[in-house]
Image (cartoon, rainbow, N blue to C red):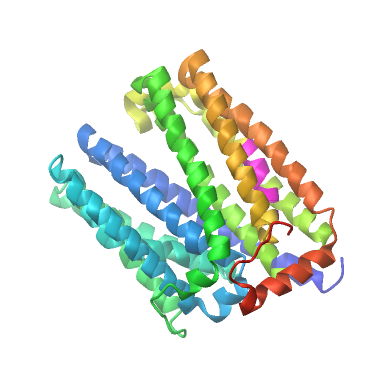
């Protein structure tokens, strides 16, 4: 390795360390909010919170696909004109918030608590989208400490708010939403301060310029998230609501890793997008990212297998009895998912978005078929084994495509990347052969 590469490698290692700490905090925060909701709210209110949280995840996914993920492969724009990116994110968040507001009005005749919770989410959503974008801007600009600050501030404010609700005996869904979404909205104001030297223009000009990337990310999100919802409905229909409860419990326990894996992909994309990378560099980054993420997944697997029954019951209550048999296939799922981290970040980092969309759509079909077949054979356990097998097949597909792609001339990647950076080429870019 040349001397010029040494500092870059060391800096990448430090950034990855900060990102790892950030994701530990973010994953712990997600787990904390789920556990607090289960303990803080009654059974009915906790069920309603699950609906609201699903709406939030959907809204966050849509905003990420349209703004946050495309900015990772355009780091020069994150550095030099983040105001336009922030402006598009705020407008997108506001438009999605209007849809959430409409859903709150629809929910009014059925449940006042659900209506109020959705209203709080709708009011907070533009700033929650801004908070998420701030984390991605930290990755894209190689300043992950900004992402860490955003997550730490939200966690501190959240803990203080929940403690205040306990002291004041305000244990309702509405106040819980104020504590959770409201503190996230307040923490998001730091994004404006972090980028205070740039003019923020609240319009969709940046999104329109990058729509050739955004719609493909959006298609991938719809495919993967739609498959998740479809499998949930399938498990409930084939194996029953009790089995679905076990599935939800298992997903709760693997959520910290899922948060880490998402950020690992984002960090890998940002690193590769900054590089004038040839085949060897790209493959080395993919291997390093995969090894790190797989080690974390392996640790999560050990935790799941060695988790004491008393602790499982303390976290999940009665749900633990139907969740415990799912620990092994759930752990294997995340190990196989970790194996995808390197090739996914590599292909997206060199803007081979057309290939990743095709893989995501194919993966959706594979997972849906195997999950339903597994549920029909052995309920929730069979469904989870079906997903585990499917993730193993998908990992092999990702590596196969990545290995073939990186066998091509690195000169071609550089030429296409330079072409894409030109403003005239931002609309209607066809990167099918990237």
| Quarter of the image where the N terminus is located | bottom right
Looking at the image, which is closer to me, 429 or 400? 429
Q: Residue furthest top?
A: 377
Looking at the image, which is closer to me, 262 or 89? 89
* Res. 401 visible in picture: yes
Query: Is residue 341 found inside the magenta-colored segment of the image?
Result: yes
Left or right: 194 as drawn, with respect to 173: right
Helix, strand or loop: magenta stretch: helix
Left or right: 129 as drawn, with respect to 218: left
- Range drawn in magenta: 336-346
| Residue depicted at x 52% and y 68% | 137
Asked where in the image residue 338 lies, by quadrant, the reply is: top right
Q: Position of residue 379 (x, y in %)?
A: 46, 17
| Residue depicted at x 60% and y 32% | 366
| Residue depicted at x 38% and y 76% | 202
Left or right: 82 as drawn, with respect to 5: left
Q: Position of residue 312 (x, y in %)?
A: 41, 28
Asked where in the image residue 252 lies, by quadrant, the reply is: top left
With respect to residue 31, does 420 lie above or below?
A: below
| Quarter of the image where the C terminus is located | bottom right
With respect to residue 367, does 385 lie above or below?
A: above
With respect to residue 369, does 103 lie above or below?
A: below
| Residue depicted at x 66% and y 78% | 422
Query: Is residue 86 found inside the magenta-colored segment of the image?
Result: no
């Amino acid at each position: 390795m040349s001397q010029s590469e040494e500092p870059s490698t060391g800096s990448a290692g430090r950034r990855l360390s900060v990102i790892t700490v950030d994701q530990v905090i973010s994953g712990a925060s997600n787990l904390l909010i789920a556990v607090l909701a289960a303990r803080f709210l009654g059974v009915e209110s906790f069920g309603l919170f699950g609906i609201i949280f699903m709406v939030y995840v959907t809204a966050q996914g849509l905003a990420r696909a349209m703004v946050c993920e495309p900015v990772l492969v355009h780091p020069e724009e994150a550095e030099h004109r983040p105001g336009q990116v922030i402006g598009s994110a705020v407008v997108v968040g506001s438009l999605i918030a209007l849809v959430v507001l409409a859903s709150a009005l629809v929910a009014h005749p059925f449940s006042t608590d659900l209506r109020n919770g959705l209203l709080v989410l709708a009011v907070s959503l533009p700033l929650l989208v801004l908070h998420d974008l701030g984390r991605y801007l930290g990755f894209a600009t190689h300043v992950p400490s900004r992402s860490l600050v955003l997550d730490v501030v939200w966690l501190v404010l959240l803990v203080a708010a929940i403690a205040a609700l306990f002291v004041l005996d305000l244990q309702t869904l509405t106040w819980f939403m104020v504590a959770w979404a409201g503190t996230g909205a307040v923490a998001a104001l730091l994004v404006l301060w972090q980028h205070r030297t740039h003019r923020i223009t609240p319009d969709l000009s940046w999104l329109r310029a990058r729509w050739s990337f955004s719609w493909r990310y959006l298609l991938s999100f719809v495919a993967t998230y739609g498959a998740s919802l479809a499998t949930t409905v399938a498990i409930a229909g084939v194996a029953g609501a009790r089995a679905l409860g076990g599935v939800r419990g298992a997903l709760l326990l693997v959520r910290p890793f899922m948060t880490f894996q998402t950020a690992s992909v984002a960090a890998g994309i940002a690193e590769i997008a900054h590089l004038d990378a040839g085949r060897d560099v790209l493959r080395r980054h993919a291997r390093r990212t995969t090894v790190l993420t797989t080690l974390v997944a392996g640790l999560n697997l050990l935790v799941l297998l060695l988790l004491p029954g008393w602790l499982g019951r303390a976290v999940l209550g009665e749900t633990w009895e139907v969740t415990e048999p799912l620990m092994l296939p759930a752990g294997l799922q995340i190990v196989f998912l970790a194996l995808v981290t390197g090739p996914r970040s590599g292909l997206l980092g060199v803007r081979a978005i057309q290939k990743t969309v095709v893989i995501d759509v194919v993966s959706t079909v594979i997972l849906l078929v195997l999950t339903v077949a597994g549920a029909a054979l052995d309920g929730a356990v069979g469904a989870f084994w079906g997903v585990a097998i499917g993730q193993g097949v998908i990992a092999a597909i990702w590596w196969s495509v990545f290995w073939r792609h990186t066998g091509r001339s690195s000169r071609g990647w550089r030429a296409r990347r330079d072409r894409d950076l030109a403003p005239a080429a931002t609309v209607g870019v066809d990167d099918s052969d990237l």
